[in-house]
Amino acid sequence: MVIDKSYPETTVDSKGRYQEMVDTLRDVGCRMTPQRLALLHILSSADNHPSARQLYEELRQQFPTTSLATVYKTLNVLKDLGEVNEMGFGSGDNRYDAIHRSPHPHLVCMQCNRIVDADAAPLSAVDRDLAASTGFQIVSHRLEFFGICPDCQAKGDTN
């Protein structure tokens, strides 16, 4: 299996994103089971950066016999192929972003764990500057801003 680690800077609508993931998995010889197709559909339209468990619970509504292992296997393949970004925060389940393939900043609520894509300038110039000044070959990066979302602020949950 050849893994493409390039990160295109463009995003597409959920239908186009779904088809991109299907095509990528087919290109590397993955079987396209109904469960896998349903999972790709959920991922391609999820703007809430779901955890594997959240994906599993949603998938089970349509396919009750699906296992959590099936979800993790598919997520790992997608991650290896550069089709999803995995975000781990040390506590709780990792979260997944399939809508935006390129690394990008996130805003993370410290109260409700909501994750929002930050609309920020691409960090490719920072990558190049760091690589030039340190000699590192930069493969990827993560940038998260932690705070309290407007909904939690309105509820008074600011601790």
Image (cartoon, rainbow, N blue to C red):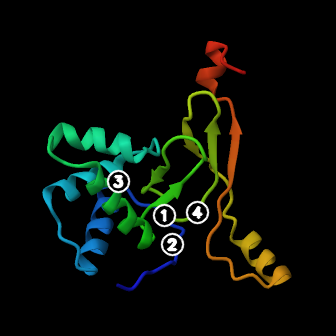
Crowding near the residue tagged with mark 1, few <14, some 14–19, many ≥20 C-alpha atoms within 10 Å: many
Which quadrant holds the N terminus?
bottom left
Structural distance between the alpha carbons of marks 2 and 1: 7 Å
Residue 158 pos. (x, y %)? 71, 21
Q: Amino acid at mark 1?
A: Arg
Q: Residue at x 54, y 35 (%)?
A: 114
Q: Which residue has dot 3 on it?
A: 44
User: Mark 1 falls on what kind of element?
Assistant: loop
> What is the count of numbered marks?
4
Q: Amino acid at mark 4?
A: Pro
Q: Residue at x 22, y 58 (%)?
A: 36
Numbered label attached to residue 120: none
The answer to whether one can see residue 48 in this image is yes
Q: Looking at the image, do the residues carrying marks 2 and 4 touch, with CB atoms under 8 Å apart?
A: no
Q: Mark 2 or mark 1, which has the lower sequence index?
A: 2
Crowding near the residue tagged with mark 4, few <14, some 14–19, many ≥20 C-alpha atoms within 10 Å: some
Question: Foreground: 149 or 77?
Answer: 77
